[in-house]
Amino acid sequence: SFQLSARGHWSTWPAFASGQTVLRNHKPCCAPEERQSNNKQALLTIPKPRYLEQLESYLRKELQSLDLTKKNSQELKLQPYREIFEFFIDNFKTYKPLLSAIKNEYEVTLAHQKKTIRALEPLKAMVTTVSEECTRQILALQEKEKDEINILKQEKQHLLKFIDNMKEEKNSLQTQVEHLQTSVAEEYARYLNEYGARKLLLAKLNDMRNERLDMTHHQVQDVKGEDVVKLTLALKIARQDLTKAQVKLNTIIADYGDVVPRRDFESLEKKCSDLLQEMKTLQKDFDQLHKEYETLLEIHRETAEERDNFCAELQRVQHNCTPRPNWAKCSEVIPGGADRWGCLAEGKSSDQLVDVLLEEIGTGALREINVFPGWGKGDKVPVYLRHEGDVKNKKLAKKDVVNILKDVWKEKIALEQQTGKRSSLPEFFLSYLQKKYGDAAAMEWSYTLYENMRLCRSNHVLSLFYEILTGKVGEEQYHGQNQLISNLQKELAACDSSNSGSLTSKHMAVREAFPLKRKESIQELVDASRYKLDSTEDLIDYISLFKEDEEGNAEPFVAKLRSQYVREKQEYLRQLKNKLGDLTEVNADDLKTAFCTIDPDIDDQTLDTYIGLAYQVQREQPDQEVVPVETALERLLAGDVRRAGPSPRERSTTGFEGE
């Protein structure tokens, strides 16, 4: 509560007296009783020390003489305060070393901040350039997409017209067939009646002819012995029979006049059979065309959904993306120069290059840190970071971090195989460090490894371990990716009958190992396996494709395989989301139906695994559980979710190609 005067003695002028201008926010350092007595003395009016008034007068005069309109006005304004502080230090001989150390630390911090600002200024121009370049590319993609949409619309209109024509032709053929069936039935009845009448008529005519011959023969024999009366009676009877026969003959002719011959009937029957067969063929073709039309409509709907997704993604990119920077400038500030930056930037996108740049900056800053502040021991703090106070930085190299994490996975897998139970990675991580380095140093290693994993996002070993350790993804992803790579190695080794370690592009068993991958994905893997070969060379050293450098970085072939794993899972879940439609919440039955629709070959065990992953419950009636669609998709994305068989769209496309 006392101030040091200009002569080096304690002044009785209180710090809270009226008119004070310096050190307003000082912390109280006395007991409550002392503060209470001081507050009573504050009621007295005590003048300022003369040295304080001189310093304040000098400060006001210097500030008034400054031109604050200049660009560096803040630095100019700081200079009078710096001089006042130096006067203050010189007069306080006892506290001069401490105050000088405080002043020097502030000066060093200001110089470091200025250096950082000057280093970041070139990035501003780079960001502007990248924004302009992305805008131009997006506009070009929009123009290209417009042409493709117009072509698809024209093709749709053409297919609709073709289907309408086929329907009209079908109706016309159906009408002709019905008319021909009616005509054939009528002709058949008429020819059948005529055929029967004609046969009956011929039989009766033959009988009458035979009777007449018999009568003539008897008349010739008995003509001499018969009298005229008898002959007259016989003639009368014969005329009556002739009249009856004529009437009967006329009746038969009238009744069987429309009967057709058998050869005409058989000809018409054959023609009718041919028309029926042709109609069945046309009906089959029509059904096939209708099925193809339904498939095309489904493909068109999916294409429209993909187009809408691309439009939304394009708008998001337009809103968020910045111009592509000149990444070559980074070689000037990255340790190792252009050669090391070329190795780091090879085959990486802009987003990945940003991760690499942040990783270099972060690791550089991490090497300058001697201690980490502890996170505390609260329940929300991960078990492997629960510590009070500062923690020493072990300052590990990246290759050492990679080797430790690989050893953690190795020990964890061995323990699970021995016990038959899956253990929690955070708890095992802490127990591993305690067992290997002791309880005292375990937290130092844990904090150092955690910070390195958090900063090195471009390294697959570190980033995947970090995501699993923090619960962002499931441990199944690590085992699933390793299983994919192991299966592919076995397929390639099986194809290498000579055990030479090399295969040609034609004998690379990528299709056999991944039968569900598209042709484009297979070609990407083949191209990645040939990245070190010339265009004339075709012999691939498949063993070297799976090697890693000392920092755990894989070859482009394995990196492409892992990126395809993530991309295929995202596409699989996007199809699932499209199948669920506009639902905001989903139960287990609806989710199972959607899975079976987009993936008909999925088995019950895999389906139950996916449902348990989406709902994260173990109960006897999981069908009653309802979760938001987005939550279920996020949980599935964090796990090892893969397609079990070809999609219905690929099945139909394969069927058309086979026909």
Image (cartoon, rainbow, N blue to C red):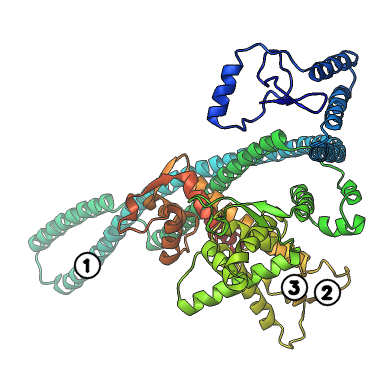
Q: Earlier in the sequence, mark 3 or mark 2?
A: 2
- Residue 501: x and y in percent read 76, 82
State which quarter of the image contains the C terminus.
bottom right
- Residue 75: x and y in percent read 87, 26
In the image, residue 86 sits, relative to residue 313, either above or below, namely above
Q: Quadrant of residue 604?
A: bottom left
Looking at numbered disc 2 in the image, what kind of residue is underneath it?
Asp
Apparent side of residue 133 relative to residue 291 in the rendered image (left or right): right
Crowding around mark 2 (Cα neighbors within 10 Å: few <14, some 14 to 19, many 20+) is some
Q: Which mark is residue 538?
A: 2
The nearer-to-camera label among 1 and 2 is 2
Residue at point 22%, 53% (across, down): 246
Looking at numbered disc 3 in the image, what kind of residue is underneath it?
Lys
Q: CA distance from mark 3 to mark 1?
A: 109 Å
Please state which of residues 460 and 652 is positioned toward the viewer in this rendering. 460
Residue for badge 3: 547
Residue for badge 1: 207
Looking at numbered disc 1 in the image, what kind of residue is underneath it?
Asp
